[in-house]
Image (cartoon, helix red, strand yellow):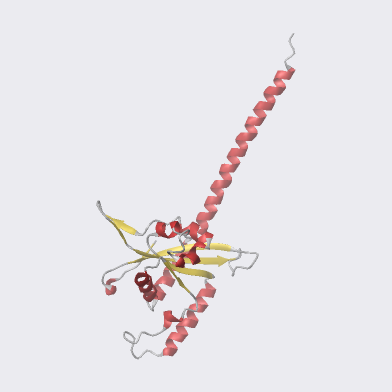
Amino acid sequence: MKNNKGFVFIETMIVTMVLITSLILIYSMFIKDTNKENRVIKYDDPAKVYQAYFLEKYLMSYNLKSKMDEMKEKNLLVVSVYKDYKGLFEPDTTDLEGVMQSDFEGESAFFKKVWSTYNINKIFIVDGYVSKVSSNCSNLTKYPELKIICSDKNMINYINTLDDYEECTDTLCKKRGNYFIVEFCESKNGKACTATDKQYYFASVGIKEASDEKARNYCAS
């Protein structure tokens, strides 16, 4: 009778290798999907979207529009909003006659407290054509203001998940407005992030344009 032990051994090894390879592929796909889900959790978490919406509405009631006007006048793709940006809370004497400067100083202090309480890391107003923003990171000579965005790889990754903020008809697409984007940084326990414990969250609100400023309305992305 012919001895088939060698053949059976080789056959077993081949089947084992196929099974191992299949398991590795399945595991890789699982890890990829898990990482993607974790990323989605960090992007546009409902609580963070609400905080971004509150911030945009609150700041727009003061001088946030001046930052948008700056973008339009200087043809910028992005501007920053800082917690100590005094221009946000300086009274406009043409619209707010009689308002005490101390009131605005109080609002500035309140905004700094909100910044700290919400664990805000950065706030940007970004051009509604976000595809133009992310695709010009190598063109900093023409758009030097993009350096503050392009140096933040997490922010760029988030921007790449957003659609251009536009409305289209059968024949024409028009920019609808800008994005108000907030980057949060927290530790695992929800406190302020530390050098060794960081978790970034991103949320955005669409600031809809209107020809009549009095008719301006807002919509969350």
Position of residue 115 in the picture relative to residue 97 (left or right): right
172 vs 73, left or right, is left
The relative height of residue 59 versus residue 135 in the rendered view (above or below) is below
Q: Residue at x 38, y 85 (%)?
A: 91
Q: Residue at x 38, y 73 (%)?
A: 70
- Pinpoint residue 14: horizontal percent, then vertical percent: 66, 26
For the residue pair 194 and 65, the one nearer the viewer reads as 65
**Dividing the image into 4 quarters, which one contains the N terminus?**
top right
Confirm whether residue 47 shows in the render: no
Q: Quadrant of residue 163?
A: bottom left
Given the current orientation, which residue lies at the most extreme front position? 141
Quarter of the figure with the C terminus: bottom left
What residue is at 32 percent from the left and 69 percent from the top?
Answer: 217
36, 189: nearer the viewer: 36
Residue 99 seen in this snapshot: yes
Work out whether 51 lies above or below 161.
below
Q: In the image, residue 30 lies at what x, y percent?
A: 57, 44
Looking at the image, which is closer to me, 65 or 114? Answer: 65
Q: Quick check: 92 left or right of 199? A: left
**Residue 75 point in image, percent of width and height:** 37, 68
For image coordinates 44% across by 59% down, the residue present is 136
Count the marks: how many?
Answer: 0
The location of residue 193, given as percent across then percent down, is 60, 68
